[in-house]
Image: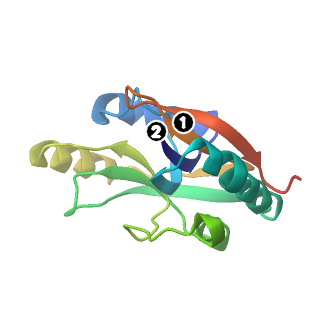
Amino acid sequence: MKYGIAIFPSKKVQDEANSYRKRYDPHYALIPPHITLKEAFEADESEIENTIIPELKEIAKNTQPFSYGIYKVSTFSPVTNTIYLKIEPSEEIFGLNEKLHSGPLHEEKDYAFVPHITIAQKLTDAEFSDVYGSLNMSKFDIQDEVDRFQLLYQLENGAWSVYETFRLGKG
């Protein structure tokens, strides 16, 4: 089965992201706005229960809650026509990402970690140019708190659902 690890931001941030996603993101119905901490990976039930969940509990217990800011949009162009809310880089979010890619969770990353919340993807070049041109002039001043992350699993229809939630700084 396919699993992933993500942070779901506050309702305020999700509402802001969804105001764009419902128009510009074909994955809108498959998963709420999120910050991907670990890309999709394959695991079986025993790996999840015996190795991954105990490790995630340990990581969560040893990671304190933190905050982050969003001040602008950015893009993965020219690689893809994806537009996202840019998470201001911090030691905390990069540290959490590193922990989720070490020890029993070690896996080579396909891409460098860029903390973000996707708001538009799979746009044509013309759509991308128009949407990014307009959003790039918008200023955002959003502060949010992270006090948990989620282990997700993918359903047969491609949608993602929460398997378990891990609270930061808690045993």
Say the numbered circle drawn on residue 95: none
Say the numbered circle drawn on residue 14: 1
Look at 38% across and 68% down and name the residue there. 111
Three-letter residue code for mark 1 = Gln
Three-letter residue code for mark 2 = Ala
Say the numbered circle drawn on residue 17: 2
Residue at mark 2 to residue at mark 1: CA–CA distance = 5 Å
Where does residue 12 sit, x and y in percent of width and height? 60, 36
Look at 60% across and 64% down and name the residue there. 105
Label 2 CA crowd tier, 10 Å (few <14, some 14–19, many 20+): many
Where does residue 167 sit, x and y in percent of width and height? 78, 48
Q: Are marks 2 and 1 in contact (CB under 8 Å)?
A: yes
Q: Is residue 53 left or right of residue 101?
A: right
Where does residue 60 sit, x and y in percent of width and height? 76, 57
- Residue 65 shows in the view: no
Q: Is residue 20 left or right of residue 104?
A: left
Where does residue 99 sit, x and y in percent of width and height? 65, 69
Look at 13% across and 43% down and name the residue there. 124
Q: Secondary structure at mark 1?
A: helix
Instruction: From this view, report whether residue 104 is shown above or below residue 157.
Output: below
Instruction: Work out which residue is located at the far right of the displayed protein and give it.
Output: 171
